[in-house]
Amino acid sequence: MSQPSTTSGSLLGGVAAAIGAWACCAGPLLLVVLGVGGAGGSRLAALEVYQPYFVAAALSFFGSAFFRLYRTPETCEPGEACAIPAVRRRQRVTLWLVAVAAAALMAFLLYAPLFY
């Protein structure tokens, strides 16, 4: 029996894809700052080819999460988590915070020259 996908699964997938999109550009800088050196960080630059795919995956995961949270709510039985307005509100706040952080990660290529 297949289990329906959840909003938290979409959030986690979006974050993972955003980190993948970020790894090619900020990963080498982070490794140099941590003292690993440029040789280890230069291997992450090979991921730059895949950045558009990671960004597309992140946007699709976040789009799915937004769709699940902002569409007309399903009918829930009393006592279920989806029937409690505070839970829904917390999920929406979490989604917006994670989406903004992921957007900053994915856009690192635009403001990376400020750090180099």
Image (spheres, rainbow, N blue to C red):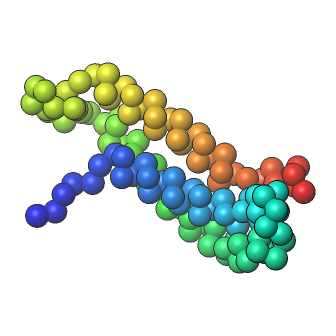
Q: Which residue is drawn at 11% across and 64% down?
A: 1
Q: Residue at x 67, y 73 (%)?
A: 47
Horizontal arrangement in the rendering, residue 17 relative to residue 22 (left or right): left
Instruction: Answer with left or right where residue 6 lies relative to residue 57.
Output: left
In the rendered view, tell whether residue 100 sits above or below residue 54.
above
Can residue 99 be seen here? The reply is yes
- To which quarter of the image does residue 85 belong? top left
Image coordinates for residue 24, horizontal then vertical, percent: 70, 67
x, y (%) of residue 11?
43, 48
Query: Residue extending furthest front?
Result: 35
Q: Is residue 66 left or right of residue 43?
A: left
114 is higher (above) or lower (below) than 29 = above
Within the image, what quadrant is residue 50 found in?
A: bottom right
The residue lying at 78 percent from left, 53 percent from top is: 110
Please state, as top left, top right, bottom left or bottom right, where the C terminus lies in the image.
Answer: bottom right
* Residue at point 31%, 27% (across, down): 87
Asked whether residue 64 is in view, the answer is no
